[in-house]
Image (cartoon, rainbow, N blue to C red):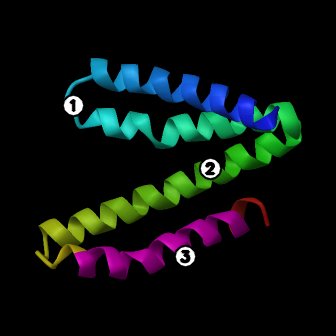
């Protein structure tokens, strides 16, 4: 039964975000809206059903902190690529430590 719920919730949410991505311009948003938000909402939906509200609150907070860390990572990678013109592999590899530091630092700061 759990797999059926996962399939239905995930499929419905992914489809809704795919439609949203199709409507928005530029089309590069379609991939953005087809992936992370839909998977996150499916995870939270199943979390409410199976684990309860406290579990989902912790998961949602963790997702938010991870998103903030990823935003910082993306900004740094863009700066390295655009300003310093280093290769994509070097930019992403060097900023990866920053992403982990930011994610775990925010976790320690907020959650403890």
Point out residue 82 in the picture as x, y percentages from the top left corner.
13, 66
93 drawn magenta: yes
Instruction: Identify the disc placed on residue 71.
Output: none
- The answer to which quarter of the image holds residue 87 is bottom left
Q: Mark 2 packing: few (<14 Cα in 10 Å), some, or many (20+)?
A: some
Q: Main secondary structure of the magenta part?
A: helix
- The answer to which quarter of the image holds residue 33 is top left
75 drawn magenta: no
Secondary structure of residue under mark 3: helix
Would you say the residues marked 2 and 1 are in contact, meaning their CB atoms lie under 8 Å apart? no
Q: Is residue 2 left or right of residue 43?
A: right
Which residue is at 42% across, 55% downward?
71
Query: Distance between the Cα atoms at labels 2 and 1?
Result: 25 Å
Query: Distance between the Cα atoms at labels 3 and 1?
Result: 32 Å
Q: Which residue is mark 3?
A: 101
First in sequence, mark 2 or 1: give its number.
Answer: 1
Query: Distance between the Cα atoms at labels 3 and 2?
Result: 15 Å
Q: Which residue is mark 1?
A: 27
Q: Which residue is mark 2?
A: 63
| Region in magenta | 89-108
Which residue is at 60% across, 48% downward?
64
Q: Nearer the viewer, mark 3 or mark 2?
A: 2
Q: Nearer the viewer, mark 3 or mark 1?
A: 1
Which residue is at 62% across, 34% downward?
41
């Amino acid at each position: 039964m759990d797999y059926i719920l996962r399939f239905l919730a995930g499929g419905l949410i992914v489809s809704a975000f795919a439609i949203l991505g199709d409507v928005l311009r530029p089309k590069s948003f379609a991939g953005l809206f087809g992936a992370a938000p839909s998977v996150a909402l499916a995870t939270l939906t199943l979390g409410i059903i199976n684990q309860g509200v406290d579990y989902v609150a912790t998961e949602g907070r963790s997702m938010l902190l991870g998103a903030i860390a990823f935003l910082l990572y993306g900004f740094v990678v863009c700066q390295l690529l655009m300003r310093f013109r280093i290769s994509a592999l070097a930019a992403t590899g060097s900023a990866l430590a920053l992403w982990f530091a930011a994610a775990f630092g925010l976790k320690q700061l907020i959650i403890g």
